[in-house]
């Protein structure tokens, strides 16, 4: 398999505070990768940096060999939290907006995903339950036809039925060679569907490992392994 | 499907397909569902399914036909061996656990016989 994402010696500071330190990692094309870490560990920041939404870091982030912010923005679909979107807008109208902004947005993919996720597109954003709002975010994010998808905490605070539906939609609609990075602080949600895990702790990437290798070589569940990294104090300073 | 998260998922998928073949849910010569369909049904990653299928093809339990998909073997010997291996796995677990309790092989047979008879009685009721 080829590498879609490679990060070399990435360090990032905001207001003189260090947020990420010397991060190194890579991702194989076609895989589903879990980005694990406690709240505040730097998962969202790392995703914002990969997608080109945040700038001013040291080191190198390369997607298929492209290192410039502008190039990366076109190659990555990052799950927006819809913060700036008017909550009175209907989902179908918001989708039209995305279609206009992103040339790679596929209307047919969006329709399929919305149907699969049982979204009623006439509903207004502000009226959606938390689960449906996240389903909508997932549908929009996966409708762009790109090589790398970044899903930031897609299961945070949503019910188990919505969670299962979202996971099924990822498995059903992920293009074979597309790569998905999913951040989560609750490992159990996604353990089954991961090819590999990246674990961030104390601003650093402390683990980059294949999921079945953790089970095979350490005889541990992904969750136990993750907890042992956090509580066992595998010290990398 | 509920997985044990301590055991590699691809391994558990292989066991699942062995079982499906042994209980004839997948019959000799039958086509195995497509990778993506299996991924959604079992809620696992397509790459993991692929790895399991690749090993099953190497073991000749499945036969891959280019462009057509994967099919359960029709070779009687392979199927017999498959069943024996899966059953022996279970028996060997039982044997190890009883041996750890210092039960002798003769006693094992006695316990097993008694137990089977008691299960039979339950079924007759």
Image (tube, coloured by chain):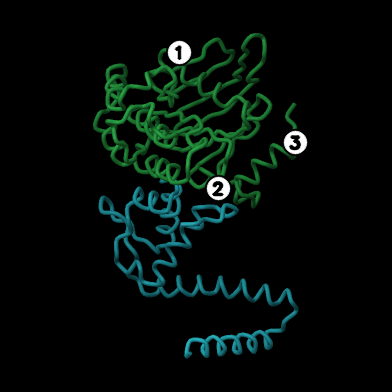
Chain colours: A green, B cyan
For disc 3, the marked residue is A233
For disc 1, the marked residue is A68
Q: Residues within 10 Å of mark 3 (few under 14, many from 20)?
A: few
Answer above or below: position of B102 versus A172. Answer: below
Q: Earlier in the sequence, mark 2 or mark 3?
A: 2
Q: Earlier in the sequence, mark 3 or mark 1?
A: 1
Answer above or below: position of A111 versus A16. Answer: below
Q: Earlier in the sequence, mark 1 or mark 2?
A: 1
Residue at image coords 57%, 41%: A187
Residue at image coords 63%, 28%: A205
Please state the chain letter of the residue tagged with numbered disc 2 in the rendered image: A
3 and 1 marks on the same chain: yes
Instruction: Between residue B34 and residue A42, name the one nearer to us.
Output: A42
As measured in the structure, the alpha-carbon distance from the residue carrying label 1 to the one carrying label 2 is 34 Å
Q: Residues within 10 Å of mark 2 (few under 14, many from 20)?
A: many
Instruction: Between residue A142 and residue A84, name the one nearer to us.
Output: A84
Residue A202, percent from left and from top:
68, 26
Question: Dot 2: what SS?
Answer: helix
Which quadrant does the N terminus of chain A fall into? top left
As measured in the structure, the alpha-carbon distance from the residue carrying label 2 to the one carrying label 3 is 23 Å
Residue A12, percent from left and from top:
61, 15
Tell us which disc is closer to us: 2 or 3. 3
Question: Dot 1: what SS?
Answer: loop
Residue A137, percent from left and from top:
39, 30
For disc 2, the marked residue is A212
């Amino acid at each position: 398999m080829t590498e879609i994402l490679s990060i070399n010696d990435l360090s990032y500071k905001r207001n003189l505070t260090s947020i990420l330190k010397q991060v190194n990692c890579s991702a194989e094309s076609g895989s589903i990768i879990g980005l694990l870490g406690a709240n505040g560990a730097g998962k969202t920041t790392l995703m914002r940096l990969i997608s080109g939404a945040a700038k001013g870091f040291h080191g190198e982030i390369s997607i298929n060999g492209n290192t410039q912010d502008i190039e990366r923005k076109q190659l990555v679909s990052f799950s927006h939290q819809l913060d700036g979107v008017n909550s009175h807008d209907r989902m179908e109208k918001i989708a039209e907006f995305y279609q206009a902004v992103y040339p790679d947005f596929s209307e047919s993919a969006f329709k399929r995903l919305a149907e699969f996720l049982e979204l009623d597109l006439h509903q207004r954003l502000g009226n959606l339950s938390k689960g449906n709002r996240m389903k909508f975010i997932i549908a929009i994010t996966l409708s762009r036809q790109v090589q790398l998808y970044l899903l930031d905490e897609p299961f945070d605070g949503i019910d188990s039925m919505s969670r299962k539906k979202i996971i099924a939609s990822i498995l059903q609609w992920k293009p074979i060679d597309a790569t998905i990075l999913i951040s989560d602080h609750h490992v159990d949600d996604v353990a089954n569907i991961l090819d590999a895990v990246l674990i961030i702790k104390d601003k650093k990437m402390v683990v980059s490992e294949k999921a079945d290798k953790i089970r095979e070589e350490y005889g541990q569940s992904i969750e136990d392994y993750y907890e042992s990294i956090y509580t066992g104090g595998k010290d990398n300073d | 499907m509920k997985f044990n998260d301590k055991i590699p998922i691809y391994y558990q998928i292989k066991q699942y397909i062995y079982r499906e073949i042994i209980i004839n849910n997948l019959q000799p010569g039958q086509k195995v569902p497509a990778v993506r369909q299996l991924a959604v049904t079992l809620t696992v990653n397509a790459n993991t399914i692929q790895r399991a299928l690749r090993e099953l093809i190497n073991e000749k339990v499945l036969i891959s036909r280019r462009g057509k998909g994967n099919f359960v073997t029709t070779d009687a010997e392979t199927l017999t061996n498959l069943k024996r291996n899966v059953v022996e796995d279970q028996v060997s677990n039982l044997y190890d656990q009883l041996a750890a309790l210092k039960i002798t092989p003769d006693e094992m047979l006695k316990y097993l016989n008694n137990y089977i008879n008691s299960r039979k009685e339950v079924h007759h009721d």
